[in-house]
Image (spheres, helix red, strand yellow):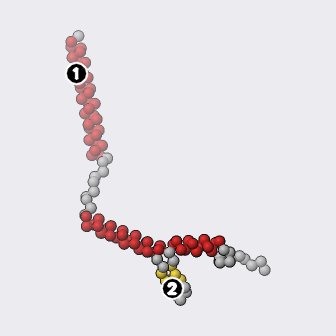
Amino acid sequence: MSDSSENSAQTQLVSFLAIVGSILLFALVIYLAYLPNRPAPVDAQLIESRKQQLAEVEAAGNSALRDYRIINRNEGVVVVPIERAMLLTVQELGDPAIAVPSETPNAE
Protein backbone atom coordinates (compact mmCIF):
# COMPACT_ATOMS: atom_id res chain seq x y z
CA MET A 1 0.00 0.00 0.00
CA SER A 2 2.95 2.23 0.57
CA ASP A 3 3.89 2.01 -3.11
CA SER A 4 0.42 3.12 -4.07
CA SER A 5 0.50 6.20 -1.82
CA GLU A 6 4.01 7.11 -3.05
CA ASN A 7 2.90 6.69 -6.63
CA SER A 8 -0.18 8.87 -5.97
CA ALA A 9 1.89 11.60 -4.31
CA GLN A 10 4.39 11.51 -7.15
CA THR A 11 1.58 11.75 -9.72
CA GLN A 12 0.06 14.70 -7.87
CA LEU A 13 3.42 16.47 -7.78
CA VAL A 14 3.97 15.94 -11.51
CA SER A 15 0.45 17.14 -12.25
CA PHE A 16 0.93 20.24 -10.11
CA LEU A 17 4.25 21.08 -11.77
CA ALA A 18 2.72 20.54 -15.22
CA ILE A 19 -0.16 22.91 -14.43
CA VAL A 20 2.14 25.58 -13.01
CA GLY A 21 4.49 25.19 -15.99
CA SER A 22 1.59 25.49 -18.42
CA ILE A 23 0.36 28.68 -16.74
CA LEU A 24 3.86 30.18 -16.79
CA LEU A 25 4.33 29.22 -20.44
CA PHE A 26 0.96 30.78 -21.32
CA ALA A 27 1.90 33.97 -19.46
CA LEU A 28 5.20 34.13 -21.36
CA VAL A 29 3.44 33.73 -24.71
CA ILE A 30 0.95 36.46 -23.79
CA TYR A 31 3.77 38.75 -22.71
CA LEU A 32 5.77 38.25 -25.89
CA ALA A 33 2.89 38.24 -28.36
CA TYR A 34 0.23 40.62 -27.12
CA LEU A 35 1.76 43.27 -24.91
CA PRO A 36 2.52 46.33 -27.02
CA ASN A 37 6.07 47.48 -27.38
CA ARG A 38 6.65 50.85 -25.83
CA PRO A 39 7.50 53.59 -28.31
CA ALA A 40 10.69 55.53 -27.96
CA PRO A 41 10.33 58.44 -25.55
CA VAL A 42 9.39 61.71 -27.20
CA ASP A 43 11.96 64.45 -27.00
CA ALA A 44 11.23 67.12 -24.37
CA GLN A 45 11.95 69.86 -26.90
CA LEU A 46 9.33 68.40 -29.26
CA ILE A 47 6.78 68.33 -26.43
CA GLU A 48 7.38 72.02 -25.69
CA SER A 49 7.15 72.87 -29.38
CA ARG A 50 3.79 71.11 -29.66
CA LYS A 51 2.48 72.85 -26.52
CA GLN A 52 3.49 76.21 -27.98
CA GLN A 53 1.77 75.42 -31.30
CA LEU A 54 -1.37 74.37 -29.43
CA ALA A 55 -1.38 77.62 -27.46
CA GLU A 56 -1.03 79.62 -30.69
CA VAL A 57 -3.89 77.75 -32.36
CA GLU A 58 -6.15 78.15 -29.31
CA ALA A 59 -5.34 81.88 -29.13
CA ALA A 60 -6.18 82.31 -32.81
CA GLY A 61 -9.46 80.43 -32.35
CA ASN A 62 -10.43 82.45 -29.30
CA SER A 63 -9.55 85.65 -31.13
CA ALA A 64 -11.78 84.65 -34.04
CA LEU A 65 -14.68 84.07 -31.65
CA ARG A 66 -14.27 87.15 -29.45
CA ASP A 67 -12.86 90.01 -31.55
CA TYR A 68 -14.40 92.50 -33.97
CA ARG A 69 -12.77 92.67 -37.43
CA ILE A 70 -13.48 94.44 -40.69
CA ILE A 71 -13.43 92.06 -43.65
CA ASN A 72 -14.49 94.46 -46.43
CA ARG A 73 -15.07 98.10 -45.53
CA ASN A 74 -16.67 98.95 -48.91
CA GLU A 75 -19.30 96.23 -48.69
CA GLY A 76 -19.77 96.61 -44.94
CA VAL A 77 -18.66 93.06 -44.13
CA VAL A 78 -17.50 92.70 -40.53
CA VAL A 79 -16.89 89.93 -38.03
CA VAL A 80 -18.59 90.28 -34.67
CA PRO A 81 -17.99 88.20 -31.53
CA ILE A 82 -20.05 85.04 -31.36
CA GLU A 83 -21.97 86.15 -28.25
CA ARG A 84 -22.99 89.42 -29.95
CA ALA A 85 -23.94 87.57 -33.14
CA MET A 86 -26.22 85.23 -31.17
CA LEU A 87 -27.91 88.18 -29.45
CA LEU A 88 -28.45 89.95 -32.77
CA THR A 89 -29.90 86.78 -34.29
CA VAL A 90 -32.33 86.34 -31.41
CA GLN A 91 -33.39 89.99 -31.70
CA GLU A 92 -33.87 89.62 -35.46
CA LEU A 93 -35.99 86.51 -35.06
CA GLY A 94 -38.05 88.12 -32.30
CA ASP A 95 -38.91 91.27 -34.28
CA PRO A 96 -40.44 90.52 -37.72
CA ALA A 97 -39.78 94.09 -38.91
CA ILE A 98 -36.01 93.57 -38.58
CA ALA A 99 -35.91 90.04 -39.96
CA VAL A 100 -34.93 89.46 -43.55
CA PRO A 101 -38.04 88.51 -45.55
CA SER A 102 -38.03 84.99 -46.90
CA GLU A 103 -38.27 84.58 -50.65
CA THR A 104 -41.77 83.45 -51.63
CA PRO A 105 -42.91 82.91 -55.19
CA ASN A 106 -45.17 85.61 -56.58
CA ALA A 107 -48.78 84.47 -57.12
CA GLU A 108 -49.23 86.53 -60.30
Residue at the spot x=65%, y=71% of the render? Answer: 94
Residue closest to the far bottom: 74
- Closest to the observer: 13 or 68? 68
Residue at the spot x=21%, y=13% of the render? Answer: 3
Please give the label number shown on residue 10. Answer: 1
Q: Is residue 50 above or below residue 19?
A: below
Q: Quadrant of the N terminus?
A: top left
Q: Are marks 2 and 1 in contact (CB under 8 Å)?
A: no
Q: Residues within 10 Å of mark 1 (few under 14, many from 20)?
A: few
Q: Provide the residue designation for mark 2.
A: 72
What secondary structure is found at the residue carrying circle 1? helix
Q: Decide which of tag 2 and tag 1 comes sooner along the chain.
A: 1
Q: Position of residue 77 (x, y in %)?
A: 53, 83
Q: Is residue 106 left or right of residue 26?
A: right
Q: Position of residue 87 (x, y in %)?
A: 57, 72
Amino acid type, label 1: Gln
Q: Position of residue 104 (x, y in %)?
A: 71, 76
Residue at the spot x=61%, y=73% of the render? Answer: 91
Residue at the spot x=55%, y=87% of the render? Answer: 75
Quadrant housing residue 43: bottom left
Residue closest to the far right: 108
- Closest to the observer: 51 or 2? 51
Amino acid type, label 2: Asn
